[in-house]
Amino acid sequence: MGTRRHRGGSSTCVHCFARKTHSYLDLDTGLGFDSQIVVKVNAPDLLRRQLGSRRWLGDHIAMGTNVDCYQRAEGRYRLMPGILGALRDHANPFSILTKGTLILRDLDLLVQASEVTDVGISVSVGFTDPALWRTVEPGTPSPERRLDVVRTLTGHGIGVGVLMAPVIPFLSDDPAQLRATVRAIAASGATSVTPLVLHLRPGAREWFMAWLGQHHPHLVRRYERLYAEGSYAPKWYQRRITRQVHDLAQEYGIGPARAGMPRRLPEPAQTAGRPVSGPTQLSLI
């Protein structure tokens, strides 16, 4: 189940697939996405109310799957402490995907929650090249600072996986670059690494291609060919990247499961006998 408390991205990435969702509010997916932030300030109260409902069966809640719940706006509105407190109090399993360092502000709450329920944390680090980071992901913490988040959380007993996303064709997919990134991820203590090749959905595609034409015009035609069939790179390319990253992960001693991964708790009594489903969508309005 995903929650969207912030819509729009003050920490901007030219490739962000969430840009399209800004159009649902009749807002611009380009500069508007970068500067117009919609905040659901009552999200913690609504979540606590729903978690306390008899109809709620304790499903897993996934946060950060659309836009980062620890982007800059969170520093001002401080919604996550209330959300994490509600999840802890109801022992409701959850996961967070972020590329922000602000998550460390809530370290105590995360530790408390991990003592009573299943907590999964993933940090997004697609590459470690500082020059590429400055142009592709302006306004976000550097890759090294994100890996510091992994070190800190794992040091407090919270297993953290790294989503190696996005792997950007012709810009971060060189074998030497992949090796440097996986090596840095392994050194941070991450429990796993999962590669994800750049995908260019409508909204993000136009913005990214305009950026590409400005910064790497020689790659425009290659991208047009690679993404000629739609939003995703061809399967052969995705399989190649996945194989390379998995081989490197094995070499450096990380993979899909290792000691220190977020623990799995016994099935809650209220869900016993009921088929376990994947995360579902929760709308907080």
Image (tube, rainbow, N blue to C red):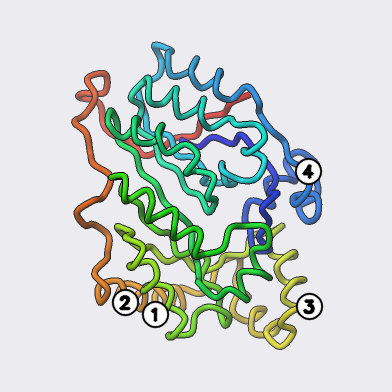
In the image, which is nearer the foreground, mark 1 or mark 3? Answer: 1
Q: Which quarter of the picture shows residue 265?
A: top left
**Cα separation between marks 3 and 4:** 24 Å
Identity, as a three-letter code, of the amino acid under mark 3: Gln
**Mark 1 neighbour class, 10 Å CA radius: few under 14, some 14 to 19, many 20 or more:** many
Residue at point 62% right, 38% down? 74
Q: Are marks 2 and 1 in contact (CB under 8 Å)?
A: yes
Q: Is residue 249 above or below residue 80?
A: below
User: Is disc 1 placed on a helix, strand or loop?
Assistant: helix
Residue 36's disc number: 4
**Where in the figure is residue 164, as x and y percent of width and height?**
45, 64
Dot placed on the residue nearer the N-terminal end, 2 or 4: 4
Dot placed on the residue nearer the N-terminal end, 1 or 3: 1
User: Is disc 3 placed on a helix, strand or loop?
Assistant: helix
User: Is disc 4 placed on a helix, strand or loop?
Assistant: loop
Q: Do the residues labelled 1 and 3 touch (CB within 8 Å)?
A: no
**Where in the figure is residue 245, as x and y percent of width and height?**
36, 74
**Cα separation between marks 2 and 1:** 7 Å
The residue tagged 1 is 179
**Mark 2 neighbour class, 10 Å CA radius: few under 14, some 14 to 19, many 20 or more:** many
The residue tagged 3 is 214
| Left or right: where 126 falls relative to 183 | right
User: Is disc 2 placed on a helix, strand or loop?
Assistant: helix
The residue tagged 2 is 248
Identity, as a three-letter code, of the amino acid under mark 4: Gln
Identity, as a three-letter code, of the amino acid under mark 1: Arg
**Cα separation between marks 3 and 2:** 33 Å
